[in-house]
Amino acid sequence: MSENRDGESTDTPNSLAAALSGIFDSTTDATMQRLLVPVDATPRSRWGVKYAVWKHRTGRPVEVSLLHVAEPLLRRSDILRFRSEQQVAQLRAHHARWLLEDAATRLRSNGIAHQLYFREGEVVFEILNAAEQLGCGQIVVPAPPPGWRRIFRGRVVAQLRGNRSGATVITVNEHGLPKSK
């Protein structure tokens, strides 16, 4: 590409399109998988990041959207007695940023494209909404633990699987490998 002295491009649209064709090849976008990986403060939530690294290492290009969803405060009056609403919002955003940056470390070290998102609301709704808005074809979550703890954590996975959105829910094990239903 050549530029005039004002820094403006002097290339014709056709030569510019030819120069960019290798960069914005349509087959690259078609094979790129967009993954939504919800994360929280538990190590289990990082299993989705391991899945993205596994896909990347096996030659399948991925782009990852890391999402942290903070549930609404149950008793706002208890918290707002001690802190202002703005202070609470800043604390929650700071906590989310720390969690997301921590989860992104492994993606960054493997050269995987990623974005960080924070939302507040009902967990299942926000995950499904984010997947749709961000164009993610897969939602990657850890498989529910066995036993009685499954009652609580398995609820989110079951609700995600029961959705009618366009995204496929992938459950993964501690090694980041997909589990069968």
Image: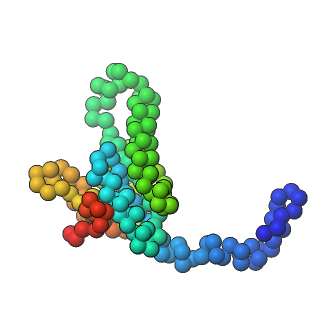
Residue furthest to the right in view is 5
Q: Is residue 117 above or below residue 167?
A: above
Q: Is residue 91 above or below residue 149?
A: above
Q: Quadrant of the N terminus?
A: bottom right
Q: How many marks?
A: 0
Kindly tell me whether residue 125 is visible in this rendering: no
Q: Residue at x 32, y 26 (%)?
A: 79
Q: Position of residue 92 (x, y in %)?
A: 40, 36
What's the residue at 83%, 58% (across, down)? 7
Residue 149 in sight in this render: yes
Question: Could you tell me residue 40's position as x and y percent?
Answer: 33, 47
The outermost residue toward the top is 81
Q: Nearer the viewer, residue 103 or 136?
A: 103
Query: Residue at 41% across / 47% down in the picture?
Result: 102
**Where residue 125 appears, x then y in whole percent?**
33, 53
Q: 21 left or right of 106?
A: right
Q: Residue at x 39, y 63 (%)?
A: 52
User: Which quarter of the rendering shows the C terminus?
Assistant: bottom left
- Residue 97, located in which quarter of the rendered image? top left
Where in the figure is residue 128, as x and y percent of width and height?
35, 58
Residue in the foreground of this view, choosing between 156 and 66: 66
In the displayed structure, does residue 115 sit left or right of residue 9? left
Chosen colour scheme: rainbow
* Along the viewing direction, whichever of 166 and 137 lies nearer the viewer: 137
